[in-house]
Amino acid sequence: MAMTDKTANPVDVAVIGGGPAGLTAALYAGRALLSVRVIEGMGTGGQMFTTAVVENYPGLGVVDGPTISQKMEAQAREWGAEIEFGQVQGISGSLETGFTLDMGEGNEPILARTVIVASGSTPRKLGVPGEEEFQGRGVSYCATCDGAFFRDKRLIVVGGGDSAVEEGLFLTRFAKSVTIVHRRDELRASPVLQQRARDNEKMQFIWNSVVEAIQGNKTVNGVVLRNVKTNEITNLDIDGVFVYIGQNPNVSFLNGLVELDGMGFIQAGEDCVTSVPGIFAAGDVRTKPLRQIVTAVADGAVAAMQAEQLLAVSKG
Ligand code: NAP
């Protein structure tokens, strides 16, 4: 497919975000013979790229995040998707007039007939003293990226969900010990992960506790924990902190354009339709009960189909 002129010819579909939802939307839009441009901020794959092991994507068995990300990107490109790197700063316009994506000062805006927002979410931060100071020096949000730096080290993982347990298990490959610090006495993670964590001799748990501060010299050497039931404060000597306490949706560039739910995710149902005609939401950024690669790719397909149908109607 020929490169589209960004300003003169609007693309049929602009996809914001190159994670599983965005790349699948691009694949489906491409296969529907629509012109499609994916705008990605960091690198394709999104959070999938930084996932150590994916083992619940049907048909692939066990696969690592980078591999599945590269395959999805290649498949979207094969069907004509253009992928460019940049940060969308804002969206204006309407279905009638077409949409303009502001790409920031000095960059040409992107014109699009429809927009699929698949911008995903970003790891939530603890917001405690030392977290920012020691980021990259013992504080991490990505076990795949940083795990190998912690051979024979003592680590804590904060959180009790799938990510905390799954990535904690991955970290046991390198670390001497991995202690899950969770604010309750029960994990949120799926039973199979919980079982694996209990069976792993390198894994330990500290229940009903939160991190109050992260300490160190050049790198992290300890954390201050508070038991939320007793308020007891303890100091724990450790070498690294991995934070997995959930996600914040990436919606700041929308500037209130589409309706959000109470948690800040884009209000859209299974049809991925948002409050603004012509703008769809797919993947983790949308209100949904289950945030998985498999549900993200499903959203991508649905959103592309919705865009295709809308364009067919508006073209008459
Ligand atoms: P999550 O399911 O929202 O879990 C976040 C965890 O962090 C919860 O245990 C929560 O505690 C805790 N937490 C939240 N705020 C905290 C704070 N300020 N201080 C301390 N702890 C805090 O997030 P996630 O694990 O990142 O998963 C996100 C989504 O991706 C989920 O839908 C998950 O199922 C999915 N996912 C699936 C897989 C898989 O299927 N293999 C892997 C990774 C992620 P509470 O439990 O007390 O609320």
Image: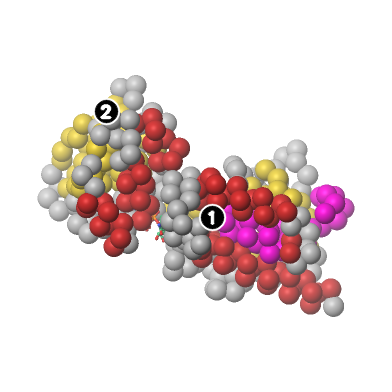
Give residue 120's mark: 1
Q: Could you say whether the residue bearing mark 2 is in a helix, strand or loop?
A: strand
| Residue type marked 1 | Gly
Q: Residue at x 34, y 31 (%)?
A: 150
Q: Which quarter of the rendered image does ligand 1 occupy?
A: bottom left
3D distance between C-alphas at marks 2 and 1: 33 Å
Q: Residue at x 48, y 47 (%)?
A: 64
Q: Residue at x 38, y 36 (%)?
A: 147
Q: Are marks 2 and 1 in contact (CB under 8 Å)?
A: no
Give residue 40's mark: none
Segment tinted magenta in the rendering: 1-29
The quarter holding residue 187 reads: bottom left
State the residue position of label 2: 221
Q: Earlier in the sequence, mark 2 or mark 1?
A: 1
Residue 61 is situated, as x and y percent measured from the top left of the image, at: 46, 57
Q: Is residue 46 left or right of residue 309?
A: left
Residue 106 is situated, as x and y percent measured from the top left of the image, at: 75, 38
Decide which of 129, 219 is in the foreground and name it: 219
